[in-house]
Image: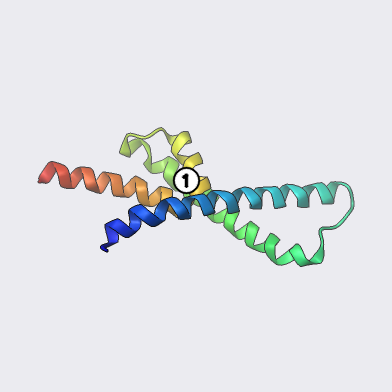
Amino acid sequence: MNLKDIKHKLFPIFKIISITLITSSIGLELWNIQTSITNSQLPNILTPALIIAHVALSAHFIEGIIAAYYAPSRNQTSIKYATYTFFVGIFGLLELFDNDEEKGLKEKG
């Protein structure tokens, strides 16, 4: 198996996992906000998960901004691709730049 085969088989699985985890992170953040408003607390066991959720949401947000910036130069809609990249993470950016490289190779060859 070469790298291209692995990428085509594993990326969809990683994207589904990423979408599930980032959606769960959003839910955890909303739960944290709700507990702050109602003066209650999250269970202490969720504190590490909340820290990981903060980091993941921040990283995905930055990736979404990068995707929104570069999407027009790759003939993609900024907001659409930024949202997609926010949910799938680095895989969205890899697709954005990989599609451009493949087009360049096809034009040369």
Dot 1 lies on which element? helix
**Amino acid tagged 1:** Thr
Point 34% across, 56% down: residue: 7
Point 41% across, 42% down: residue: 69
Point 44% across, 40% down: residue: 68
**Relative image position of residue 62 (x, y in whole percent):** 51, 51
Nearest the eye: 45 or 66: 45
Point 83% across, 51% down: residue: 36
83 left or right of 54 in image: left
Nearest the eye: 92 or 2: 2
**Relative image position of residue 5 (x, y in whole percent):** 29, 57
Q: Which residue is mark 1?
A: 85
| Label 1: few (<14), some (14–19) or many (≥20) C-alpha neighbours in 10 Å | many
Question: Which quadrant would residue 104 be assigned to in this image?
Answer: top left
- In the rendered image of this protein, does residue 35 appear above or below residue 70? below
Q: Quadrant of the N terminus?
A: bottom left
57 left or right of 73 in image: right
**Relative image position of residue 19 (x, y in whole percent):** 54, 48
**Relative image position of residue 14 (x, y in whole percent):** 47, 55
